[in-house]
Image (cartoon, helix red, strand yellow):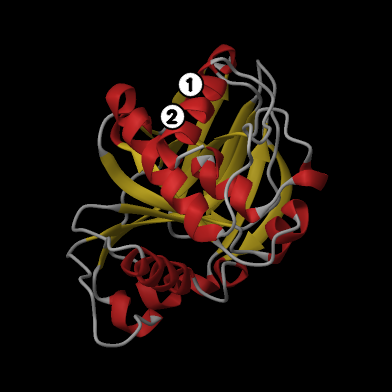
Amino acid sequence: MTPDATAAWLHQSIKSREVLTDPPGGLGGDLADAYRIQDALVRLMEVDDGRVAGWKVALTTPVMQQMCGVDHPCEGAVLANRIHLSPTVCDTSTLGHLGVEAEIALRVGQDLPLSDRPYTADMVADSIVAAHAALELVDDRNADYSSITAAKLIANNSLNAGIVLGPAVVDVDIRLLDRLAGAIVVDGAVIAEGTGADILGHPLNAVAWLANSLHARGRMLAAGDIVMCGSFVRTQFPVAGQSVTCRLDQLGEATVSVV
């Protein structure tokens, strides 16, 4: 199938809450094919969920790479209507299977256009104007994680179903985000802990990776975009009636109640 036809098939599968599987004919031969499918899928999603307002960087920590069996980051688009302010509620009846991930989110204050050399953490640091404790809502659609591939994640927009942002913090030293300690908390109990350094060594490395990946696809990070830097702990799978919080030193909390 063409990228557009494959994306239409995936879009219907997502809306029908079907188990995550490859479409007839597969997902193409390489990651470039998978990103072409993602782009086509996102165009379909924008009809219901608004314009692209940010990006997620998936699989930026060893624990998440081990969980999915993929040894490099992947990206996905975050749509405007899927951005929620903490505290919020997630209705699981609209999803195949909810996962929640604890993350640091960064807001970009200026465009990061194509450069004559790859972006580095130092190069992107001054473009960040705010940081948030955040949660990503993922819909893995009851995936068999033993069969997850990078192409499958990418084509399915890296499984993003929304994000939850805590209050914007503008007075934190962005260059020291790697030193922040954080935790994911379910119903008041700390389930797992990590630090900003778990995210590719520093959350700014995730921003730089994303800027370079987007440039390779003819796109760029733009002023106002939110970047979800990746989960610093393993995904949790809450059920209706539970509450999940990302708690981060200096950045506060983001909370979702599951119904």
What's the mark number on residue 87?
Answer: 2
Q: Who's the residue at 31% across and 75% down the image?
A: 124
| 153 horizontally vs 254: left or right | right
Q: Choose top left, top right, bottom left or bottom right for residue 84.
A: top left
Q: Position of residue 6 (x, y in %)?
A: 50, 34
Report the mark closest to the observer, 1 or 2.
1
Which element is circle 1 on? strand
Residue 75 visible in the displayed image: no
Q: Position of residue 212 (x, y in %)?
A: 37, 72
Tell me whether circle 1 and circle 2 mark residues in contact (CB < 8 Å): yes
The residue under label 1 is 89
| 70 horizontally vs 88: left or right | right
Which element is circle 2 on? loop
Q: Name the foreground residue: 18 vs 58.
A: 18
Q: Who's the residue at 47% across and 40% down the image?
A: 254
Residue flagged by tag 2: what amino acid is it?
Answer: Pro
| 16 horizontally vs 130: left or right | right
Question: Which quadrant, please, contains the C terminus?
Answer: top right
Q: Choose top left, top right, bottom left or bottom right for residue 166.
A: top left
Q: Is residue 244 above or below residue 228?
A: above
Query: How many numbered marks, from 0 up?
Result: 2
Q: Label 1 to label 2, Cα distance in Å? A: 7 Å
Residue 30 visible in the displayed image: yes
Q: Position of residue 149 (x, y in %)?
A: 69, 51
Q: Who's the residue at 35% across and 83% down the image?
A: 118
Residue flagged by tag 1: what amino acid is it?
Answer: Val
Q: Residues within 10 Å of mark 2 (few under 14, many from 20)?
A: some
| 161 horizontally vs 143: left or right | left
Q: Who's the residue at 66% across and 16% down the image?
A: 240
Q: Position of residue 214 (x, y in %)?
A: 35, 63
